[in-house]
Amino acid sequence: MENKQEYFCSNCNSKVEEKDKVCINCGADLIDENGWHRFKNKIISCINKFSKYHRISYYLFLGPLLMLITNICLAILAMAYYELLRDTVESLSLNYIFDYFAFILTWIPFILPVFVFTYLYLEVRLKLKIIITISIIFILLFSLGFFKYFGLNTFGIIPLSIILLEIPFIKYSKKDYSVLIIMIILFLGWFQFFSLGYLQSEIVRKDYKKITDTLNVINAEVDFISAPDDSEKYDEIVPFILFREKDTLQLALKYVKTWDKSIPSQKWKLANWSIDSVFAQYLYTPKKF
């Protein structure tokens, strides 16, 4: 049994016949092109088909797929850069240009899914879709920096992204609040119970300064000489080697995750600390100038 191939206009997604040269719905040219143009039009046509499905299918399938494909392509591009262009760029002292370029590239996996969502589900002009995409990306970028600064994990960027997509969808399309309500509940749940991220360096610096203020430390390194015997009791241990004039010490700051009634409910707390002497061969010898 022969399968009949269906064709869709890449401009308005309406169904057309193989023999058609012009879309009867929007008037766009339907030219059978070869190579890249034909491949691009097929990709656009496949993406357009998603406008017929509920947007949950986009969140669960098409959005993550776009991010995966984009990350693979960028990884290949990064490897090509390091293999072929790295030495040339360094010789011309243009590293700073490629640093900015690399920063932009890391956000393409986020920019593309956001724009495709606005393209499929928002019934507005293209210019407004671009503005909405840029606005959402800037909010996400600010939020990601906010999460890291306050020691929150970045998992919350997922429900936040969907919330930001749902707001313009509700405003410009169907008034369906179901997904928005669910994601707000998940975001608040993350913020209350699962938002604690890595131990912040600022917390460690304050505790280190308080403990070593009177020890006359010449130099210090973050490193282990020997692990504390009770290390399994703590969520995080930060070790320091303290070089002094006559001896060398190892300081271990021992942290645990605590719970309270505030928001967020998890916090890092210095539960204990210890200072031990170490072997003579680790003594610090100041450099003579």
Image: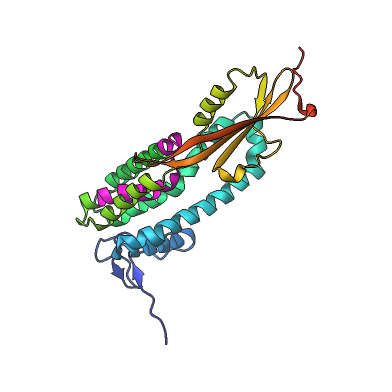
Please indicate whether residue 222 sits to the left or right of residue 26 in the image.
Answer: right
- In the foreground, 7 or 142: 142
Q: Position of residue 80 (x, y in %)?
A: 62, 47
Look at 49% across and 56% down and name the residue there: 69
- Tell me the quadrant of the picture where the C terminus can be found: top right
**Can residue 225 be seen?**
yes
Picture coordinates of residue 193, whole percent (x, y): 39, 47
Which residue lies at the image location 49% right of the left edge and 43% below the top edge? 106
Q: Judge whether 251 appears above or below 187 on screen.
A: above
The residue range painted magenta reads 145-169
**Toward which corner of the image does residue 283 lie, by quadrant?**
top right
Q: Residue at x 51, y 37 (%)?
A: 199
Q: Main secondary structure of the magenta part?
A: helix
Q: Is residue 188 above or below residue 282?
A: below
| Image position, residue 16 (x, y; %) | 31, 70
Q: Which quadrant of the rendered structure holds the N terminus?
A: bottom left
Q: Is residue 135 left or right of residue 101?
A: left
- Relative to the observer, which residue lies in front, 76 or 174? 174
Give yes or no for residue 124 being in the magenta stretch.
no
As displayed, is residue 135 above or below residue 44? Answer: above
| x and y percentages locating residue 124 in the rendered image | 24, 50
